[in-house]
Amino acid sequence: MRKALAVGRKEFRQIARDGRTLSVLLVVPVLFLLLFGYALNWDIHHVKMAVNDQDRSPESRALVQAFVRSTYFDLVGEVSDRGIGALMDAGTVRAVLVIPDGTARRLHGGEPAPIQVLIDGDDANTATTVQGYVQSLLETQSAKYRLQAYPRAGRPPVRVEPRVWYNPELRSVLFLVPGLIAYIAMLTAVISTALSVVREKERGTMEQVRMAPLGALSYVTGKSIPYLIVSLVSSFGIVVAAMWLFDLPMRGSWLVLLLTLTLFLLGALGLGLFVSTISDSQQVAFQIAALASFMPTLLLSGFIFPIASMPVWLQATTYLVPARYFLVALRGIVLKGTGPAVFWPDLLALALFATAVIGLAAVRLRREWA
Amino acid sequence: MNTGADTITVDRLTRRFGDFVAVDDLSFGVHQGEIFGFLGANGAGKSTTIRMLCGLLLPTSGTATVGGVDVRRDPEGVKRRIGYMSQKFSLYEQLTVDENIRFFAGIYGLSRAKFEERHRFVIEMAGLEGRGRSLTRDLPGGVRQRLALGCAILHEPPIVFLDEPTGGVDPLSRRRFWRLIDTLSAQGVTVLVTTHYMDEAEHCHRIAIMHAGRLAALGTTSELKGLFRGRSIVEIDTGNPVMAMRVLQDAPAVEKTSVFGTAVHAVLRHGDDDLAELRQRLTAAGLTVGAIAPVEPSLEDVFLDVMDRRAS
């Protein structure tokens, strides 16, 4: 154990002295958070909209006002029938509201009054969202008119009053930040651990150390502890930065957060060690580590793409991605304030992953060691 | 110096990598306090042998004991008894001199009191007084080499393995390094060293020449030079050694030739009675011939001779 400590102390000094490693571990994560936090935002406000009002009635103007008041739409101006195509082509507007002649008359006569909304579909995500806004706006409006037309009918018998828990404003950043923490922590922990071991192979210091009566286990322990501590510090840094910059609530226990992060990072370190045992140069190690950590974490963890909407075979592979479990636990702690009583199976899965991957790395390293 | 007891014994040691036999049926012994040199081309099996003796690589067959410990049965026990230094002088370059010494003392499990004593010893040996806080990468090659040796013998091992320890170091530093090795040997430390440099090999008490995984020759410098008994070597000074070699190779008295600086060494099949004939041949070919004189075989002559005979 004293020998492992000697290795750990040496590793700490190396990290502290090597500006590149230190910045990868501490600065890059926060930079990533800023970049992704601001760029990865699915909330759509201020959609540019033009109006083609052929009715020119108080009713049609009220309709336009309803759109503008919602803040989801910005009125760019009026547009003629012929001008619509050019405006959409140029991307000046993403939506055009067409109110046909006679809309007011139909409304008062109790007839259905069709309203047309043209949406630019070149970005399917935005188009879907805009469509949703339009629908709910128009529904609210027609409910008002129905009440005016048939006052005796009263309110509709069934009314939905949705209330969203944990993230009432449905801010996507609250959903994304836990994923970002997983992504960044995984990337930095795996890559830095893998590189630090392979660097020793490349420079020959590994061989020198192997000549000493030092077991593979002491070496690995000493090598991992500094990275675990630095990764923990950097992960907490991300959480705090997200609380400060993106109003991330922290509803759960910090102690449980520490436990969850530690389990997750142990798995990441193990993965990094494993990568180092199958690569002989820093370049190869970097590529394998990046591929093994960031692809699954980004694509298969539920960070961006919901697992439930994947095909079954792909869903099955997500069980091998530690970030999947980590995300459940982390969102639970940060957004819901729940504890291990709820997500213990995920913690167990994280622990299993860490044990398996560290065991695998140890077996491979021991074979290489002597 | 030579107490007669073998601290390293190697018996029919063999190591295969797939079909390739890196070390083939190697047997020898090294006495305590001896400086034992390993000479051979790259890929002759020197490093593989050292790695097996250090307990890093298991032999395919055969046995070896180092300091009385079987390398196959107790590699960890071997590691406690040896120091190892390679041509890379594998220190941590971003760490200071003191931090490197502290690290190696740590992984060898030195006690605090012992550490103080050995730290002083290494600093003094490497000539690094007052430079404990310098970064290792800023040190000149020769100093780094001495520091690496110091770190390798922090735990006072009775046996030291040096794998091409003087690569890329200036001649003055090499000389100083070899003085350290002589001191170690005088203190009873057994040193097994591989090298490419013939002048370094002359420092060794005994030399093993390896070729293609096998032991090609083994003995003291003078024993090895005795391989030339009955033949003789002449050094021939001409303006054009390449041309001279071509002419000499056609002479029936000449067994073979090699370039030696600007001169040519020719190995004669018999005594040195055909010198006049050689001079005649060279002059006839239009070469201006300076001195032709018999010389003592150098270790390089021996090495090339052994290689030649192995190859044929």
Image: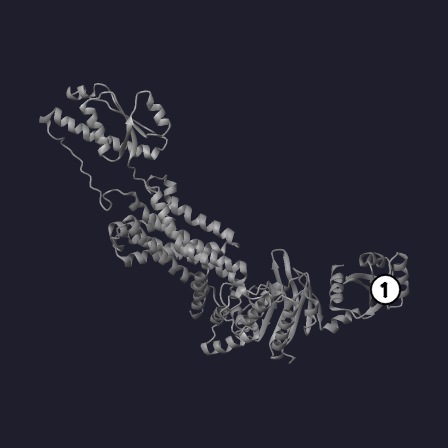
Q: Residue furthest front?
A: A77
**Residue B60: percent from left, percent from top:** 59, 62
Decide: is A327 above or below B292.
above
Secondary structure beneath disc 1?
strand
Q: The disc numbered 1 marks a residue on which chain?
A: B
Q: Is residue A120 left or right of residue B100?
A: left
Q: Is residue A344 left or right of residue B12?
A: left
Q: Nearer the viewer, residue B66 or A186?
A: A186
Q: Nearer the viewer, residue A139 or A96?
A: A96
Q: Quadrant of the N terminus of chain A?
A: bottom left
- What color scheme is it? one colour
**Residue A30: percent from left, percent from top:** 37, 52
Q: Is residue A247 visible?
A: yes
Decide: is B222 above or below A173.
below
Mark 1 is on which residue type? Answer: Gly
Q: Quadrant of residue B82?
A: bottom right
**Residue B152: percent from left, percent from top:** 55, 70
**Residue A162: percent from left, percent from top:** 20, 39
Q: Quadrant of residue B267?
A: bottom right
Q: Is residue A370 visible?
A: no
The residue that label 1 is drawn on is B290
Q: Nearer the viewer, residue A347 or B16?
A: A347
Q: Quadrant of residue A89?
A: top left
